[in-house]
Amino acid sequence: MAHEFNMKLTPQEEWSWLLAVDLFLGGMGGGLFLLFLLFNLSPSIAVLSLGLVALGAVVLMVELGRPLRAWRALCKPFSSWISRGVIFVTLFIVFGALYSAPAFDSLSWLAPGSDTARRTIGVVAGISALFVTLYPGFVLAASPSIPFWNSPLLPVLFSFHSLMVASGLIFLIAPLGLESADLRSISFLGGILIVVNFVLGAMYLATSKGSGLASKEAVRRLNEGSLGWTFKVGVILVGMIVPLAVVLWTPSAMALAGLFILIGGLLFRYCVLKAGVYVPFPLT
Amino acid sequence: MATSEKAVASKNGKAPRWGMAIDLKRCVGCQSCTLACKAENGTPPGIFWMRVLEKEEGSYPQARKVFLPIRCNHCSEPPCVPVCPTGASYKRKRDNLVLINQDKCIGCRACVVACPYQVRFIAEDSKGYYGEELTPYEAESYKKWQPRTVQKCTFCVDRLETGREPACVQTCPTRALVFGNLNDLESEICKLVRQRSHFQPRAELGTDPSLYYLT
């Protein structure tokens, strides 16, 4: 029995696919709403973003050991980033729905009376959406036990990645009726976001490599073995390089680029979670 | 040693801060503390609130094994508490123990991931050591925790409240584990910490663990 108690660098096993799916859906939904506000897109995009965030919340509840107690997660916003995240998600869904309501006849009774009220609701929904994209990074960064996550760069990276994935979703659904002028602007932004994420990711890995044994091991795991293949092929090649090439040289295949960005976005969150390695105990 | 609250409060105006000194020169890696913890707290298969890590050092003929008993450190600044979104993980003011209110725990695992000592656990189900059907002992002891919520060492809080030491301390055959009030300068644990060279596990994280390893 005692032989199982040896000290070694152990990866965290607590958070895996389900949380990655939740982070992916929530981040994509928040990012999509920000793009909706930025480019004044169709209200159906706002509804889609609300649906994605709500679906993410459902996935998160499925992952909980005691889903029926999920309401309790609202209780500690002054200390817990999960609690703050739940509040941002709730605010986003409420204010996002109020903001989008006037576009639908059957929901017009929900619409705010004045333009000022609508603008205020839009600002609250937008800020909540921004925090929906940011908070997962803060949740992970709050764990001192896993130095690879314990970085101020992680929330920034998660937020930019969410915007990139949201632009990928727009590429994918553009053939369903997005105006070509909007698509051109978003594809330009999408290209920039891919480059920004590439640079941020490289900075994150470079700083992690020099942040001690456990972080170095996390970076090694992202470069070797099955997780290494998932990261290099799934996240970097499929999720970034190929879509960037499509955006630059083959705009007619934008939907495919969008699909690839989504696959890369999901795998990125999975890889970040699975690369988390605990610092082993010191033994004198 | 008196561990009941009244006995401690009468000695010192401050609330007790329960802690443990672990003498690494005395620990022989017998795992009797591991078993005493299991017997006292009825933890399910695969979950060890207390365990002794071991490592081989050197090479033949100077090879030797070194041991490190680990468990919840009941930190003064516990990283598991602020990450909890429900307040289920909390530090009890009256004795500075870090405890879990399992009725509030939603099983989000944030505290399990945040703990730098990897001493928080989630039992996915209530299976016993001998399959689905629990032994009478397991059926009784499993009432202390709920499946799919977090559990960990409580310093045997039930025993403390009746003036007894934690089960691991009482069992240790080499007296490697010394339990006491870190806020009482006259306690044995404080004397040991003053007299002996020691370290706190991963003190660089600022958690101020209530565990001292005597070297």
Image: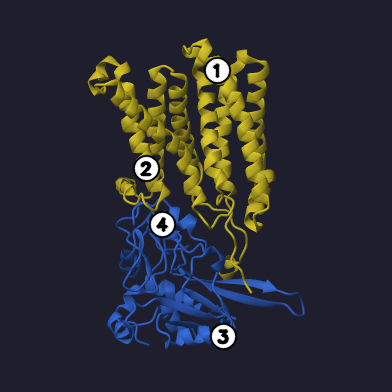
Chain colours: A yellow, B blue
CB within 8 Å, label 3 to label 4: no
Between A13 and A111, the one lying in front of the other is A111
* Amino acid identity at mark 1: Ser
Mark 1–mark 2 distance (CA, rounded to whole Å): 32 Å
Q: Which mark, by number, is residue A185?
A: 1
CB within 8 Å, label 1 to label 4: no
Look at mark 3 in the image and give the residue it sits on: B196
* Amino acid identity at mark 3: Arg
Please, which residue is most extreme toward the front here? A116
x and y, in percent, of residue B131 in the image: 41, 60
Between A187 and A58, the one lying in front of the other is A187
Tags 2 and 4 on a common chain = no
Between A130 and B98, the one lying in front of the other is A130
Residue found at x 66% / y 19%: A248
* Amino acid identity at mark 4: Pro
Tags 1 and 4 on a common chain = no
Q: How many marks?
A: 4
Residue found at x 48% / y 62%: B46
Task: From the image, state whether disc 1 or disc 4 is nearer to you.
Answer: 1
Mark 3–mark 2 distance (CA, rounded to whole Å): 47 Å
Look at mark 2 in the image and give the residue it sits on: A86
* Amino acid identity at mark 2: Val
CB within 8 Å, label 2 to label 4: no
SS for dot 4: helix
CB within 8 Å, label 3 to label 1: no
Chain under callout 2: A
Tags 1 and 2 on a common chain = yes
